[in-house]
Image: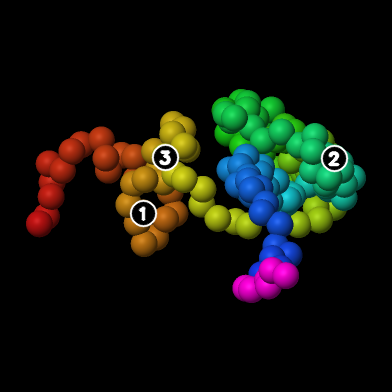
Amino acid sequence: MSSQKGNVARSRPQKHQNTFSFKNDKFDKSVRTKKINAKLHDGVCQRCKEVLEWRVKYSKYKPLSKPKKCVKCLQKTVKESYHIMCRPCAYELEVCAKCGKKEDIVIPFNKEPENAENNQRSNHRRSCKRNEESDDDLDFDNDLDDTGENQAD
Ligand SMILES: [Zn+2]
Ligand SMILES: [Zn+2]
């Protein structure tokens, strides 16, 4: 009789599975979704906030690719999707930035100076140094007119 030696039963099936999967696509998608999900719908009323949240939930929220025109200042300063007004305008008028109505704002805008380079409006006043006693702008303008002829320094 033949003796069996060293016959160790290998119960491990030789699987040649390719466990490699393309994660890039998934990853990219989730980051984008996360970004949108993390979006703070500030400066809008309760109803508009719900609408925006609904859009996010059902993946109908489309981020703006470029700024839209604000209905108030008519500048392309609207950076939020579905908003009709830019932040400064909505903030100033205390209205919802999306529907433009005077409603209770759920999350008020942070009064933060957004990138100033976008605010290239004609008001030069702000970029000029302010006098300690800022009582009159006209006075200040006059000062600028004659360019330092009578400089005491
Ligand atoms: Zn505006
Ligand atoms: Zn609204």
Image quarter of residue 96 = top right
Quarter holding the C terminus is: bottom left
Is label 2 in a helix, a strand or a loop?
loop
- Indicate which disc residue 130 carries: 1
Does the closest atom of ligand 1 sit within 8 Å of the Cβ of label 1?
Answer: no
Q: Residue at x 61, y 42 (%)?
A: 22
How far apart are the alpha carbons under marks 3 and 2?
Answer: 35 Å
- Indicate which disc residue 58 carries: 2
Is 104 in front, or is 33?
33
Q: Nearer the viewer, mark 3 or mark 2?
A: 2
Instruction: Say if residue 10 shows up in the picture.
Output: yes
Contact between marks 3 and 2 (CB within 8 A): the answer is: no
Marks 3 and 2, the one that precedes in the sequence: 2
Q: Amino acid at mark 2?
A: Tyr
* Residue range highlighted in magenta: 1-6
Q: Nearer the viewer, mark 1 or mark 3?
A: 3
How far apart are the alpha carbons under marks 2 and 1?
Answer: 49 Å
Is label 1 in a helix, a strand or a loop?
loop
| Location of residue 117 in the rendering, given as x and y in whole percent from the top left corner | 42, 39
Image quarter of residue 12 = bottom right
- Indicate which disc residue 19 carries: none
Label 3 sits on residue: 117
The correct choice, above or below, for 104 with respect to 48 in the image is below
Q: Nearer the viewer, mark 2 or mark 1?
A: 2
